[in-house]
Image (cartoon, helix red, strand yellow):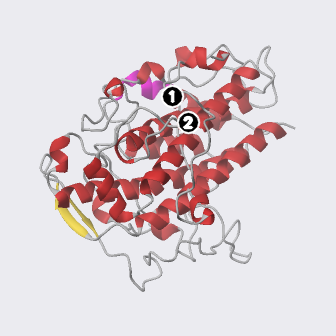
């Protein structure tokens, strides 16, 4: 066990097992599989410089601002890994790369109605996020800087349905059972006239409006949730839209933070991890379009959800149009350009934290968790590119 693993006590081991056999889908399709996240309380941070520009952290090999950017990213990846592990336990491939669960056959079948390779995709996305937070924390420690550590906040219950790792029940960071999803990314990437960086007040239409109201579960909470096939399919559909909703956040977060990095090496880290989030996002945005149209009522909460048929001719909703439409960029005096959006850097970390909080991902977390996350986000947003 290396120094970083001793400090963080990770729950997943064996980072470099033999590669698995590729599924039957093409390599290019597999390559399109990303993330956003944050970290824990002020007491866990080392005594670093209080300035986040050119000045170096005391007795470390990395500037305070650069360390803050990577620490926030590591915390975000820890959070992302936590909920992907939950998805993998119930609906992903169970192997030595991502161990712990045993799979839920009914939930897995509902996911495979959407995409027959869903288990492989979930597995590989989970593995990616684990490697991201481990690398980022190991890099911080190698430079003498404090890593992100969310272990004190592993207190949420999670699912108790067949397939979950019983050792993790009551030890989750994230809540997948009370989600409110903003699916406006669907039309944002299809809209050729608006860019949130230039049009911050423009309201992009929701792909699934009912997911944007009420609280919805994306995993079976107990085995009772698997008894009604229509409701179980609604749960799987919710997961299918949660995947790209999360990944489009990381898709924007990394290029936005990269603009604040001083070290070329830190810049290299951010712009190397960021595109994997984009690959995740495009894969999941393609998959989400296959969610079967249906309506269902949650028997526990009474909340209704309706998934529309997205095989339509309307260019804002057509599920086949998964490439980003060119849109205005930097200035309307310049030609449209196909880009990641948004990428404006001001307040990006606090924006990411608000995005995740509004989603309901942290329902049940402690005030100490939110205090720690706010501090990490504020420090990342205070980073300035050096001279």
Q: Nearer the viewer, residue 17 or 5?
A: 17
Helix, strand or loop status at disc 2: helix
* Res 71 → quadrant: top right
- Say if the magenta span includes residue 380: no
Q: Which stretch appears magenta? A: 365-373
Residue 128 position in % (x across, y down): 58, 43
Q: Is residue 114 above or below residue 378?
A: below
For the residue carrying disc 1, how many other residues have a C-alpha within 10 Å: few (<14), some (14-19), or many (20+)? Answer: some
Position of the N terminus, as image quadrant, is top right
Q: Nearer the viewer, mark 2 or mark 1?
A: 1
Q: What residue do we see at 63% from left, 34% from top?
A: 16
Helix, strand or loop status at disc 1: loop
Position of the C terminus, as image quadrant, is top right
Residue 306 position in % (x across, y down): 24, 66
Give the numbered dot on residue 130: 2
Q: Kindly report the secondary structure that dominates the magenta region of the rendered protein.
A: helix
Give the numbered dot on residue 380: none
Residue 277 position in % (x across, y down): 59, 51
In-image side of 146 versus 312 (left or right): right
- Say if the magenta span includes residue 366: yes
Q: Is residue 383 visible?
A: yes
N-terminal of the pair, mark 2 or mark 1, is: 1
Q: Is residue 321 above or below residue 145?
A: below
List the residue tagged with mark 1: 12
Q: What residue do we see at 43% from left, 25% from top?
A: 369
In-image side of 63 versus 136 (left or right): right
Q: Residue furthest bottom?
A: 313
Distance between mark 2 and mark 1 Cα atoms: 8 Å
């Amino acid at each position: 066990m290396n120094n970083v693993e001793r400090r963080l006590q990770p729950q997943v081991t064996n980072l470099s097992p033999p590669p698995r056999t590729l599924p039957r889908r093409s390599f290019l399709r597999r390559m399109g599989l990303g993330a956003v996240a944050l970290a824990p309380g002020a007491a866990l941070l080392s005594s670093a410089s209080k300035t986040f520009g050119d000045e170096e952290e005391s007795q470390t090999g990395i500037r305070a601002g650069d360390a803050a950017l990577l620490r926030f990213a590591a915390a975000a990846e820890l959070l992302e890994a936590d909920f992907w592990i939950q998805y993998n336990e119930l609906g992903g491939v169970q192997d030595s790369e991502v161990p712990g669960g045993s799979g839920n056959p009914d939930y897995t079948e509902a996911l495979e109605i959407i995409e027959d390779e869903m288990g492989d995709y979930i597995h590989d996305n989970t593995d990616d996020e684990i490697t991201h937070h481990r690398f980022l924390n190991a890099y911080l420690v190698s430079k003498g800087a404090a890593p992100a550590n969310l272990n004190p906040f592993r207190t949420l219950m999670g699912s108790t349905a067949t397939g979950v790792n019983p050792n993790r029940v009551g030890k989750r960071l994230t809540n997948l059972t009370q989600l409110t999803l903003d699916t406006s990314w669907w039309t944002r990437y299809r809209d050729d006239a608006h860019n949130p960086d230039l049009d911050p007040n423009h309201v992009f239409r929701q792909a699934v409006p009912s997911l944007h109201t009420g609280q919805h579960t994306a995993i079976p909470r107990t085995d009772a949730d698997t008894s009604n096939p229509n409701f179980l399919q609604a749960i799987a559909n919710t997961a299918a839209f949660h995947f790209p909703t999360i990944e489009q956040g990381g898709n924007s977060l990394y290029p936005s933070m990269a603009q604040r990095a001083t070290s070329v090496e830190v810049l290299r880290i951010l712009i190397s991890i960021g595109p994997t989030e984009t690959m995740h996002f495009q894969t999941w945005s393609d998959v989400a379009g296959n969610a079967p149209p249906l309506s269902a009522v949650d028997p526990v909460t009474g909340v209704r959800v309706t998934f529309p048929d997205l095989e339509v001719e309307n260019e804002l909703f057509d599920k086949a149009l998964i490439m980003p439409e060119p849109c205005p960029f930097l200035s309307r005096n310049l030609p449209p350009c196909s880009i990641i959006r948004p990428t404006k850097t001001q307040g990006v970390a606090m924006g990411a934290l608000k995005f995740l909080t509004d989603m309901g991902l942290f329902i049940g977390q402690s005030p100490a968790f939110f205090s720690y996350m706010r501090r990490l986000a504020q420090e990342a947003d205070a980073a300035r590119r050096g001279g």
